[in-house]
Image (cartoon, coloured by chain):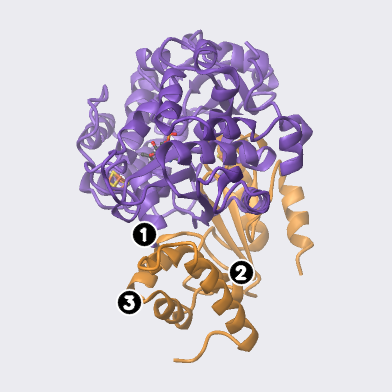
Chain colours: A orange, B purple
Amino acid sequence: MAAPFDADQQARFDAGIAKLLSQFPNDRKQAAMMGAVRLVQELVGWVPPEGMEQVAQKLEVPVSKVLEVATFYVMFFTKKPGKYVIDVCTNISCSLCGAEKLLEGLERKLDVHAGETTADGKFTLREAECLGSCHTAPCLQINEDHHENLSLKQAEELLAKLA
Amino acid sequence: MAATELITRNWKKKDPSLKAYEAAGGYQQLRKVLKMQPADVTAEVKKSNLRGRGGAGFPTGMKWSFVPANNPKPRYLCVNADESEPGTFKDRYIMEWDPHSMLEGCAIACYALNAHACYIYTRGEYKFPAEVMDKAIAEAYAAGIFGKSVLGSGFQMDCYQVRGAGAYICGEETGLLESLEGKKGWPRLKPPFPAVSGLFGCPTVVNNVETLASLPFIFEMGAEKYAALGTPKSGGTRLIALSGHVNKPGVFECEMKTTLRELIYDLGGGITGGRKLKAVIPGGSSAPVLPASNIDIAMEFEALKDAGTMAGSGAVIAMDDSTCMVRALWRITRFYAEESCGQCTPCREGTPWMTRLLRKIEEGRGQPEDINMLLSVASSIAPFPPMGLGQTICALGDAAALPVHSFLQFFRAEFEEHIRLGRCPFEKPWGSLGEGRFQ
Ligand SMILES: Cc1cc2nc3c(=O)[nH]c(=O)nc-3n(C[C@H](O)[C@H](O)[C@H](O)COP(=O)(O)O)c2cc1C
Ligand code: SF4
Ligand code: FES
């Protein structure tokens, strides 16, 4: 199977895994899984099958275990997402303060439904569950960076700034 | 009402560094504790009447004492920093503004438990809090607080942060342990309880961030004084996260006797737009809702339990009179449907079913029999009033069923009106109902 990483990425991956493994008992390599999958995603933007193979080898587990984890958690992408992933919280406190309207506005603006990626591959728009910022509703995250107290206009301005 | 400042004491400085924490007297309590016998440390925590701040409100000292003394395996402390209950955002501030108070608590707990490793499981979305914590942990290692000899005492402990990746169920303590072991976060059947067989099959204590951050204060002021701040069964102060239709939402440190009314009208500045309060959820989205007529009630474990609800994660969500209760319940129920791990049939099948029924009613397609159907599905996940766990492996099932029961208990007329009119009677719909998995 093709290598998912170039030489530099491979070096960072190897070092990262070694550090993760040092945090757990020697006979519990699988415990490094969350960090390992996150590392793959940080390096290549998502978790491709080749990346899962690498993790499986390092942690000495079957690839199926890696796949199970990669597909269980919403922050891991087993399909390549858009360059910017926009997670809009529509949970209860945010909805009370207009989050669903914000999401609707962004759906119109980007011409996608929540869960979809724009045709140019730039934005993936998603509905997120409570982001722990309920008092600064509505809020959203762009590739894990948090933005709060947003009007639709402010959210659109944020997106406009992204290359 | 505005309580003694304990947990929030250092927040004003907005300086999470070790230097600032030490300047404010930080790590002095750990020094004190390291000279005590571990059993005495646990005894002191018991005396303080500290109850867990993560949701269930279990007495912390008692939980620690369940770790068997004669088990030769290593012990672990796991910090529940998964904070994913909708409405809850208090732990995040401890991590961002005063991370060392929690780390001092972790070291105190590890010493009491004779645990040599502490894993902080931080929810994946908390990028910034996780960065602050990483820095704080590194500072603590550099200062000899963690490592081979904690503050020169000869006691060894390591502390690591592990980040989740977006799954509410990993806040449930056994789901958290599964995730820490590198698996999907499927909760485990209990017993055995984690205190006996937890992380890697070893004795483990799982504590919430705020629970641990409260520990230094118990040793600073003495357990009796700490206990006296609270009620006979629940010591200390607690953080309340206030959100929804209030003028000044935020995190407030409250005394146990602070009432919901005081929180909403005094600390929270009242309802936005001068509107009327309609309902309050007092303990995170899973806590049964209270009508506005019932807010002269202390936000404390026992009083809220007596009122048929729960203190839960300390998240108060206020809803004004423009709120459609069908819509609000749909929103809450859909969350549990999305987040059910799928192991137990009542939870896996019941939560989407309730979500679909609620959407149908909100969209004006409801039939009179749908209300009883809703109640019957909710009861098959968890009966009301709560009879204790049993129907499902973990309490997510209860968390999904309780709001359904309570919304219908207090606001049934509104559900009936939707069905009678064949539409939502509220003028300002929130927006589209979205395209989630559960239509
Ligand atoms: C579905 C579910 C989600 C939970 N989420 C959290 C959470 O995000 N944070 C937390 O501290 N406790 C959470 N809990 C409670 C934990 O299972 C556990 O009781 C708590 O971490 C114990 O710590 P404490 O005794 O210090 O409160 C959750 C429980 C359930 C059933
Ligand atoms: S109650 Fe729901 S979330 Fe909990 S174990 Fe069962 S299916 Fe999973
Ligand atoms: S409900 Fe949106 S951040 Fe909590």
Q: CA distance from mark 3 to mark 2?
A: 34 Å
Q: Are marks 1 and 3 on the same chain?
A: no
What is the count of numbered marks?
3
Q: Which mark is residue B420?
A: none
* Residue type at the position of mark 2: Thr
**Tag on residue B184?**
1
Q: Position of residue B148 (x, y in %)?
A: 54, 53
Task: Name the kind of residue labelled 3 in the image.
Answer: Pro
Binning the other alpha carbons within 10 Å of mark 2 as few (below 14), some (14 to 19) or many (20 upward) gives some
Number of the label disc, if any, that sits on residue A118: 2
Residues beneath discs 3 and 2 located on the same chain: yes
Measuring 44% from the left and 17% from the top, which residue is drawn there?
Answer: B234
Q: Residues within 10 Å of mark 1 (few under 14, many from 20)?
A: many
Residue, x 27% and y 43% (percent of image)?
B196
> Residue B294, image x and y in percent?
46, 10
Q: Nearer the viewer, mark 2 or mark 1?
A: 1
> Callout 1, which amino acid?
Lys
